[in-house]
Structure formats: C-alpha cells, structure tokens
Image: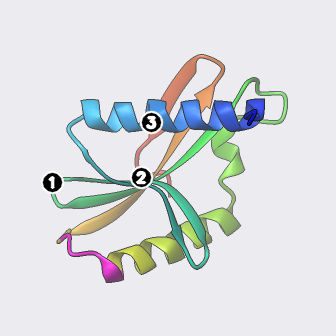
Amino acid sequence: MRVHPNQALGRFGEERAARWYVDAGYLILERNWRGRAGEVDLFCFRGGVLVVCEVKSRRSDRHGIPAEAVTSVKQGRLRQLAAEYASGSSIRFRSIRFDVASLLGQDFSVIEGAF
C-alpha cells in the first residue's frame, strides 16, 4: 500500500517532534491518541507537566506557516481532548501545556505554551 506524500510528511514531522521531546527529557505517553473529538499527535510528560502537542508539517509557506493551521477551533478541540485524556489518566500532573511543533521544509521548531 502506498503512503500519500502528505501522510509521509506528517509522520516525519511527528517523529521529529517525538525525538525533540525525548531529547529534552520528556516521557512520551501517547502518540496519535484518539478521543471522542478527534486525535492528539503527542501527549508528553515531564516535571509534573502534561504536554499536549499538535504537530503541523508543510513543505513550503505558500499556504502560511504550519503553526497558523492551529486555529481557535482546533485549539478548543485540543483542550476538550486533553480534558478527556486527563480524566482517564493515572498520571498525576500539576498543569497542562499546549505546544505546537512546526516542520517547514527542513526547519523544525516547538512553540511551548502556544495557547
């Protein structure tokens, strides 16, 4: 089965983000976790903080930078999914942080506390 180039790019971006978090000392709790309202790319944990990470990958900025794709509607959905995940989790955390990981061509960055 062939993987669409956009799917391959998305998977590459998610893998790059997961490596970034592991290298920064985070524990990856979940990848591509599905809840009632959709999917969360990464749930990570470090120092009492549960991190919800949305990963956006693009080849160029012709349609805007990747982080711009995380609209207020998407942010609301991620908040809802985080609450659903947290209510069923045995992990004890002090706070939840929402990050956006962005892959644009070869440039990778993470916006910690993006919203």
Residue picked out by circle 1: 47
Which numbered disc flags the more N-terminal residue, 2 or 3?
A: 3
Q: Amino acid at mark 3?
A: Ala
Which numbered disc flags the more N-terminal residue, 3 or 1?
A: 3
43 above or below 25? below
Nearer the observer, 23 or 68: 23
Residue 108's disc number: none
Q: Secondary structure at mark 1?
A: loop
Depth-wise, is mark 3 or mark 1 nearer the camera? 3
Q: Which residue ends up furthest to the top in the rendered image?
A: 106
Q: CA distance from mark 3 to mark 1?
A: 19 Å
Residue 17's disc number: 3
Q: Secondary structure at mark 2?
A: loop
Point 44% across, 71% down: residue: 82
114 above or below 79? above
Question: Can residue 57 be seen?
Answer: no
Residue 113's disc number: 2
35 above or below 64? below
Q: Is residue 73 left or right of residue 23?
A: right
For disc 3, the neighbor class at 10 Å (few under 14, some 14 to 19, many from 20) is many
Give, as a single range, the part of the protein colored magenta.
Answer: 87-91
For disc 1, the neighbor class at 10 Å (few under 14, some 14 to 19, many from 20) is few
Depth-wise, is mark 1 or mark 2 nearer the camera? 1
Where is residue 91 shown, x and y percent of the image? 20, 69
Q: Amino acid at mark 2?
A: Gly
- Magenta highlight: main SS: loop
Q: CA distance from mark 2 to mark 3?
A: 15 Å
Q: Amino acid at mark 1?
A: Gly
Which numbered disc flags the more N-terminal residue, 1 or 2?
A: 1
Asked whether the beta carbons under mark 1 and mark 2 sit within 8 Å of each other, the answer is: no
